[in-house]
Image (cartoon, rainbow, N blue to C red):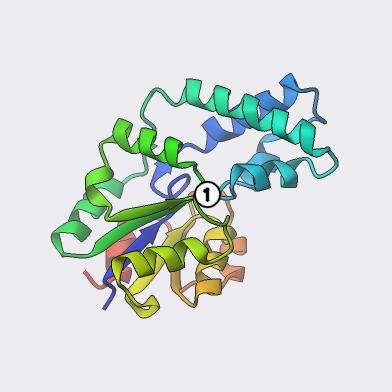
Amino acid sequence: MTKLVIFDWDGTLFDSIDKICQSMLHAGELTNAPKRYHNDVKNIIGLSLDNAVKVIWPELPVEHLNNIVEHYKRLYVAKDQVPPESYRGVIDTLDLLKQNGIKMAVATGKTRRGLDRVMTLTETAIFFDTSRCADETLSKPDPLMLNEILEELNMSVEDAIMVGDTEYDLNMANNAGMRSVGVTYGAHDVSRLKACKPHAIINEFNQLTHVLGL
């Protein structure tokens, strides 16, 4: 029986994909970086910010990338003052999991400051027993953040399942030896999710209850 469900945030629980893409593209423009497009940014959602800009602009020197990161942080925070919309069924499903005694955690490419801000805006901190952010540990798909969550909550890998919308989430779970569930409405298309061989793929968040046998 699953005792712990670990969720990605952006593109899995809350729809912040356009906000991320717009902020990153604008940051690139402000630094005169080579032109990139929405799908170029959508592809990296889930990675830590430092790793993400390296993937989007691999030809740029570190100093330029750091400049993009600083602009992105400022632009994103300005957009992030309004709570993002949760995907359909998310809040009801989180509530059901909590009622059934299932522990929940977040493993995200966000910074700690960013996750704390959005949890406050969305009033969702009550659902989660712990969380790990990209500035506290290694970036996905390294399994370290999952291993740290398991250790903190005194859970075995067999007790847990990872839910995410990108191959970075699912490969992180694979690298930890953990089962995973891919959601098809987020950043990566279903073919990329299937290639990671998750335990299940769902099209609506509330289908997670069937995967968990609730």
Q: Position of residue 7 (x, y in %)?
A: 39, 56
Task: Determine which quarter of the picture holds residue 29.
Answer: top right
Q: Is residue 191 above or below residue 8?
A: below
Give the total number of marks visible in the rendering. 1
Q: Position of residue 60 (x, y in %)?
A: 83, 38
Task: Determine which quarter of the picture holds residue 6.
Answer: bottom left
Q: Is residue 87 above or below residue 128?
A: above
Left or right: 210 with respect to 22? left
Mark 1, residue position: 134
Left or right: 178 with respect to 4? right
Q: Position of residue 25 (x, y in %)?
A: 68, 29
Residue kind at label 1, given as amino acid type? Ala
Q: Nearer the viewer, residue 138 or 75?
A: 138
Q: Is residue 52 visible?
A: yes
Left or right: 102 with respect to 173? left
Q: Nearer the viewer, residue 161 or 192?
A: 161
Image quadrant in which the C terminus is located: bottom left
Task: Determine which quarter of the picture holds residue 99.
Answer: bottom left
Q: Residue at x 30, y 72 (%)?
A: 154
Q: Residue at x 53, y 46 (%)?
A: 135
> Which element type, helix, strand or loop, lies under badge 1?
loop
Q: Is residue 36 visible?
A: no
Q: Position of residue 142 (x, y in %)?
A: 58, 64
